[in-house]
Image (cartoon, rainbow, N blue to C red):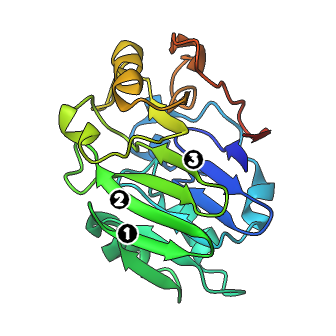
């Protein structure tokens, strides 16, 4: 599996046959609401040449579901995408184009093209927010994207014991885990490795603040094979 961090909480999974994109934020819309949150990461326009097979939005905040970014992907009609999102986003995203919009709330599962997607609990200021398990049925790998969340013992109860790689926020503001709690959460989940993210877009923080030896540090827009 090749994984690209596309900034903030955006990810692209690509196994050579299926492309899965999560929470792309490729505009400067947040700065229009709060000028202090001007983006620090340049936009890679080449990403808009991709038409994902599956698009996932974890919750209804502009740096996760951004209408400007979403419209540029979803208004392309060259093929039908599956769009998985909780109710707060589902009501908005399905206005962009003709795709298969799936209302994807906690405990919902969706299986497609050799992958099983499961929505799990997240504890965040959007009450509909979810995390997502991505299970590669062919390779037997399980990837867990927490979405924006605080540390919660209740989340662990939603999770399997065989997670290979977890992606988790470490910025410590906006109802997200800080780096210390992210390490605690990673160890509680029992995943093999962790990718810290949700830093560097509006702040000067680095993923390096996540202090566990089993971390995998990704560079923005650089493809990494895992």
Image mark count = 3
Label 1 Cα crowd, 10 Å radius (few <14 / some 14-19 / many 20+)? some
Task: Compare residues 72 and 217 and report the one nearer the observer.
Answer: 217
Location of mark 1 (residue): 109
Label 2 Cα crowd, 10 Å radius (few <14 / some 14-19 / many 20+)? many
What's the residue at 28%, 45% (across, down)? 122
Cβ–Cβ below 8 Å for labels 2 and 1?
Answer: yes
Cβ–Cβ below 8 Å for labels 1 and 3?
Answer: no
Would residue 159 appear left or right of 3 to someone viewing this image? Answer: left
Query: x and y percent of residue 140 in the render?
Result: 60, 54
* Up/down of 33 relative to 98, above or below: above
Q: CA distance from mark 1 to mark 3?
A: 21 Å
What's the residue at 18%, 39% (across, down)? 154
Query: x and y percent of residue 183 in the render?
Result: 41, 18
- Earlier in the chain: of badge 2 and badge 1, it is 1
Would residue 204 appear left or right of 148 to someone viewing this image? Answer: right
The image's mark for residue 119 is: 2
* Up/down of 217 relative to 221, above or below: above
Location of mark 3 (residue): 10
């Amino acid at each position: 599996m090749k994984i690209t961090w596309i900034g903030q909480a955006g990810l692209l999974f690509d196994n050579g046959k299926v492309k899965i994109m999560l929470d792309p934020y490729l505009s400067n819309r947040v700065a229009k609401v709060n000028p202090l949150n001007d983006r620090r990461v340049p936009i890679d326009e080449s990403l808009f040449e991709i038409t994902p097979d599956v698009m996932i939005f974890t919750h209804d905040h502009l740096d996760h579901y951004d209408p400007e970014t979403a419209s540029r992907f979803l208004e392309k009609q060259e093929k039908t995408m599956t769009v998985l999102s909780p109710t707060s986003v589902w009501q908005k995203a399905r206005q962009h184009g003709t795709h298969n919009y799936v209302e994807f709330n906690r405990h919902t599962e969706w299986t497609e093209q050799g992958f099983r997607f499961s929505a799990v609990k997240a504890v965040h200021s959007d009450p509909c927010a979810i995390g997502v398990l991505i299970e590669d049925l062919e390779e037997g790998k399980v990837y867990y994207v927490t979405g924006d969340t605080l540390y919660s013992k209740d989340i662990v109860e939603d999770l399997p014991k065989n997670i290979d790689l977890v992606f988790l926020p470490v910025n410590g503001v906006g109802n997200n885990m800080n780096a210390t709690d992210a390490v605690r959460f990673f160890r509680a989940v029992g995943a093999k490795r962790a990718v810290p993210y949700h830093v560097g877009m509006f702040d000067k923080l680095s993923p390096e603040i996540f202090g566990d030896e089993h971390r995998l540090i990704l560079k923005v827009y650089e493809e990494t094979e895992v």
